Amino acid sequence: MRGLDHYVACFYMCLGFLVPLFTCELLLFCSNPAKFIAECRRLTLGSFLMTALCGFLNIFGIITYYAATSTISATVAFAIFLCTPLVSISIGVRCFRELNDEPRAKHVLVFTILALYVVAILVISANALISGTDD
């Protein structure tokens, strides 16, 4: 079965995400249990579902990255995977208006983040074109 090794690696990588997740949650809880519990109680069903959808899309992006590496160059697949933050930031800013009424400095910061992601994608793609080999 072609690509099986990629899916196995992806599975263990996704499992590896759980350790820092639980560690961070435990540290947040231990630092201020009352605030942690209050934040959990503030979580509405809608915000929970939106957050779960974002997590699903992120993990789905990782899985498609590993699937793509079995058919295209790993550097090109990684460049495609790097587009995830571009999409999520763009949706947050344009659809959810997350930067409305925010100071100009925050707008500049978000634009800088987006520009650096574009540069990173271009550099990785250029490297794949220059090397011309599959990873």
Image (cartoon, rainbow, N blue to C red):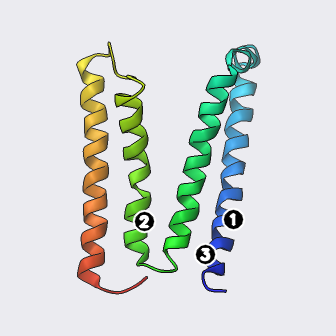
**SS assignment at label 2:** helix
- Which quadrant does the N terminus fall into? bottom right
Left or right of residue 85: residue 40: right
Residue 38 percent location from the top left of the image:
72, 14
**SS assignment at label 1:** helix
Give the image quarter of residue 129.
bottom left
Residue 34 percent location from the top left of the image:
75, 14
- First in sequence, mark 2 or 1: give its number: 1
Label 2 Cα neighbours within 10 Å, binned few <14 / some 14-19 / many ≥20: some
- First in sequence, mark 1 or 3: give its number: 3
- First in sequence, mark 3 or 2: give its number: 3
Between residues 51 and 30, which one lies in front from this camera angle? 51
Cα separation between marks 3 and 2: 13 Å
Q: Which residue is mark 2?
A: 78
30 vs 21: above or below: above
Residue under the point 71% across and 57% down: 15
Residue 36 percent location from the top left of the image:
71, 20
Give the image quarter of residue 40.
top right
Q: Which residue is mark 1?
A: 11
Q: Which mark is residue 6?
A: 3
